[in-house]
């Protein structure tokens, strides 16, 4: 195939493979996903309902845990481009498009990394792409609702940009753009893992070129742009984590026999004996064939002196093993800020399987190079890739079929109907925003939000005053604004049925904390009360992000000076 047609062909074939693998999810556009998908659907619905039905920018979610921030929630995906597909397709179909987009990104990323960095033939690159893009890590994340982990699909693109070395500023800005996209997609695990991944790839580049200064400049531009462009998310997340710290114990470790099981078990019990997490946290199936090819690729890497493939496999593998002792790599990493909130070391399997996929591609290349006839080599490569693809699709189908939860409720919220309920949580959690219902229940495994114990349940007024102090004449509640008419016979406290947060504002006074509830102290008389949520940091952080985005776009478009051919030749040597 002419190289000019190859990108389109790779994209179309990747899309076809993604659609075939995830067909059980696509068959009925209305069905929702199980497990954490209900939480993801809820988060998207809270923002969607706020914008479409109430015309309010999504900053506060009153439908969960008595009311929690959207802007400061690290898992929020409101600012990701995928979210805006909701206004054309609805939230459920939009998250399915997001999933397919990341599968395609994973497949094409490994393909082009193998083609461009390692100069492998198309069939070998395709095999490596299938091993990773259709492997167990993405299947379990996609089936179980770990949508904030999808950004791991950008890992091969990050590696490709770090090692391209043609237009340094443009490539550094490209890395920053992918890191920013990861942040906007709620990448609670991918972003801190990517910091390590990019640092490792830059260290490999520095060792291979024997020059550290360009790599340090590259890191400065990439991480500096991320900090500036991501201010609109980083600042609110920092404030949320400061108010609700999330430190988790380091209490999981893997034996090598269990790693083998992770990579080869097509079926497994839901609970994993001796471990605190369910099987989806460990399932990383790539199959025996891929592992055999990876072993062959390991020999080729040793002969070809591609030591970074061995080093990377060892580094990420040691981190994946978890708490093997006080000085184990993951135990040391877990002592650092941010990393002390990451509780599942087995998630480093995403990088382990990426390196195994690259080694499998090298193993396939080693086999094909022994075939003297080009057409026969091409046919053999296609056969190997097709066999691996069939194995992976067969193993993933029972998992993908878990996409069978009921559709969201088909109603439209009204501002005078909001109240809290505490029944059939799992079934209605995703539909609470469009039902205009809230719950004091907090989703297990998420942030350490705390709901006030004084909130009340039932279809009752959401504003109260003491009976001997006056009465509530009327009230309405939208996601960000609570309005009420109250008549007070004496100075009294007006109490609302949602959590207190310092970002609430009122023209009638300063909101106060009443046993964890949002309240307002008012003098006697008739008052029109309006309490609205508007964080002080929003405008400043948004302005900083806009300036950073302008700089990033300029670097991506202008690119700066290209490296000379002599410099690139010297690096290659």
Image (cartoon, helix red, strand yellow):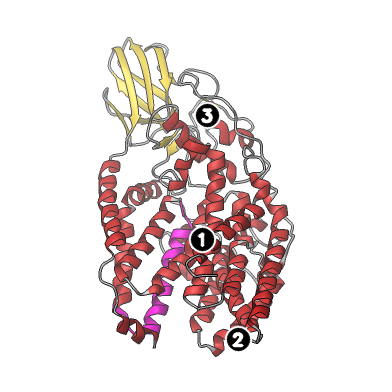
Q: Quadrant of the C terminus?
A: bottom left
Q: Magenta residues?
A: 186-213
Q: Calculate the distance from the C-alpha at mark 2 to the C-alpha at mark 3.
A: 57 Å
- Name the element at disc 2: helix
Identity of the residue drawn at 67% across and 58% down: 279
Residue 14 x %, y %: 58, 59
Q: Which residue is mark 2?
A: 299
Q: Is residue 126 left or right of residue 516?
A: right
Above or below 266: residue 185: above
Residue drawn at x 42%, y 59% as measured from the top left: 338
Circle nearer the N terminus (3, 1): 1
Q: Residues within 10 Å of mark 3 (few under 14, many from 20)?
A: many
- 396 left or right of 543 in image: right
Q: CA distance from mark 3 to mark 1?
A: 40 Å
The residue under the point 39% across, 33% down is 500
Q: Nearer the viewer, mark 1 or mark 2?
A: 1
**Count of marks overlaid on the render:** 3
Q: Residue furthest front?
A: 2
Instruction: Provide the residue designation for mark 3.
Output: 434
**Image coordinates for residue 308, horizontal then vertical, percent:** 49, 80
User: Is residue 195 found inside the magenta-colored segment of the image?
Assistant: yes
Q: CA distance from mark 1 to mark 2?
A: 33 Å
Q: Nearer the viewer, residue 225 or 66?
A: 225
Observer able to see residue 326: no
| Residue shown at 33% from the left, 19% from the top | 529
Sequence-wise first label, 2 or 3:
2
**Which percent across, then down, holds residue 67?**
45, 34
């Amino acid at each position: 195939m002419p190289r000019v047609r190859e990108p389109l062909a790779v994209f179309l074939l990747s899309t076809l493979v993604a659609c075939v693998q995830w067909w059980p999810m696509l068959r009925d556009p209305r069905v929702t996903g199980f497990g954490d998908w209900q939480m993801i659907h809820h988060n998207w619905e809270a923002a969607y309902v706020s914008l479409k039905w109430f015309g309010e920018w999504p900053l506060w979610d009153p439908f969960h845990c008595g009311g929690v921030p959207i802007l400061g929630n690290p898992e929020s995906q409101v600012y990701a481009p995928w979210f805006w597909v909701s206004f054309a397709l609805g939230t459920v179909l939009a998250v399915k498009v997001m999933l397919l987009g990341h599968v395609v990104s994973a497949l094409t990323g490994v393909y082009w990394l193998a083609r461009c960095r390692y100069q492998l033939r198309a069939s070998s690159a395709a095999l490596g792409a299938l091993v990773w893009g259709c492997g167990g890590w993405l299947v379990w994340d996609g089936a179980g609702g770990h949508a904030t982990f999808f950004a791991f699909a950008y890992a091969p693109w990050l590696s490709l940009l770090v090692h391209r070395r043609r237009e340094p500023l443009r490539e550094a800005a490209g890395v920053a753009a992918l890191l920013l996209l990861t942040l906007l997609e709620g990448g609670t695990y991918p972003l801190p893992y990517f910091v390590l991944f990019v640092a490792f790839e830059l260290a490999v580049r520095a060792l291979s070129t024997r020059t550290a200064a360009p790599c340090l400049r590259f890191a400065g531009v990439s991480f500096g742009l991320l900090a500036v462009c991501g201010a609109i998310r980083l600042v609110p997340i920092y404030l949320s984590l400061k108010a609700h710290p999330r430190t988790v114990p380091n209490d999981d470790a893997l034996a090598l026999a269990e790693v083998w099981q992770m990579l080869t078990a097509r079926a497994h019990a839901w609970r994993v004996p001796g471990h605190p997490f369910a099987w989806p946290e460990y399932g990383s199936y790539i199959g025996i064939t891929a592992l055999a090819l990876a072993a062959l690729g390991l020999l080729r890497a040793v002969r070809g002196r591609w030591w970074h493939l061995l080093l990377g496999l060892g580094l990420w593998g040691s981190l994946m093993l978890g708490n093997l002792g006080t000085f184990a790599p993951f135990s040391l990493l877990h002592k650092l800020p941010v990393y002390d909130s990451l509780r599942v070391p087995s998630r480093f399997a995403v990088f382990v399987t990426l390196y195994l996929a690259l080694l499998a591609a090298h193993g396939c290349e080693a086999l094909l190079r022994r075939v003297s006839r080009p057409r026969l080599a091409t046919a053999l490569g296609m056969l190997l890739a097709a066999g691996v693809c069939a194995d992976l699709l067969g193993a993933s189908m029972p998992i993908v079929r878990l996409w069978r939860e009921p559709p969201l409720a088909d109603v439209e919220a009204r501002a005078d109907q909001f109240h809290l309920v505490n029944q059939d949580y799992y079934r209605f959690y995703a539909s609470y925003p469009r039902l205009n219902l809230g719950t004091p229940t907090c989703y297990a495994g998420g942030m350490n939000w705390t709901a006030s114990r004084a909130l009340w349940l039932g279809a009752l007024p959401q504003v109260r005053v003491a009976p001997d102090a006056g009465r509530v004449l009327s009230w309405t509640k939208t996601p960000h604004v609570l309005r009420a008419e109250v008549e007070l016979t004496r100075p009294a406290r007006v109490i609302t049925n949602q959590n207190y947060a310092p970002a609430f504002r009122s023209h009638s006074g300063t909101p106060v904390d009443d046993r964890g509830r949002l309240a307002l102290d008012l003098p006697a008389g008739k008052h029109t009360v309006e309490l609205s949520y508007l964080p002080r940091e929003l405008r400043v952080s948004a302005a900083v992000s806009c300036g950073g985005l302008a700089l990033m776009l300029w670097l991506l478009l202008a690119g700066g000076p290209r490296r000379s051919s002599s410099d690139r030749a010297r690096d290659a040597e």
